[in-house]
Image (cartoon, grey):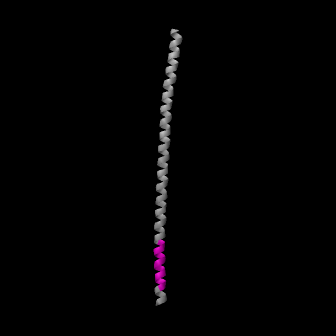
């Protein structure tokens, strides 16, 4: 009787350990997915900010070049 009882206890402990292990694995997987999503969002935001800065610089440079060309042309026409 004692042998059967200890075998049943071993089986219950084994089942409990398996369920805890599954829970830990699922938790680790969810955590890894959340970290990966957070990294992707941060990377996308960083790229978006860099693109915006490049757009602003391009617009400013275009305005400067057009202004310089316009005044040179005006100088040549009036000079």
User: Vertically, is 73 above or below 44?
Assistant: above
Which residue shows up at 49% across the image and 50% down it? 39
Outermost residue, bottom side: 1
User: Vertically, is 6 above or below 22?
Assistant: below
Q: Is residue 14 magenta?
A: yes
Which residue shows up at 50% across the image and 17% down it? 70
Q: How many marks?
A: 0
User: Vertically, is 46 above or below 32?
Assistant: above
Which residue shows up at 52% across the image and 23% down it? 65
| Image x and y of residue 21, in percent | 48, 69
Q: Is residue 63 magenta?
A: no
| Image x and y of residue 2, in percent | 47, 89
| Image x and y of residue 31, in percent | 47, 59
Which residue shows up at 47% across the image and 40% down it? 49
Outermost residue, top side: 79
Q: Which residues are magenta?
A: 6-18
């Amino acid at each position: 009787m004692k042998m059967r009882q200890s075998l049943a206890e071993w089986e219950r402990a084994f089942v409990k350990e398996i369920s805890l292990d599954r829970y830990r694995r699922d938790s680790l997987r969810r955590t890894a997915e959340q970290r990966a999503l957070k990294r992707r969002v941060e990377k996308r935001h960083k790229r978006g900010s860099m693109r915006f800065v490049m757009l602003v610089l391009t617009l400013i440079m275009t305005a400067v070049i057009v202004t310089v060309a316009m005044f040179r042309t005006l100088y040549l026409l009036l000079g």
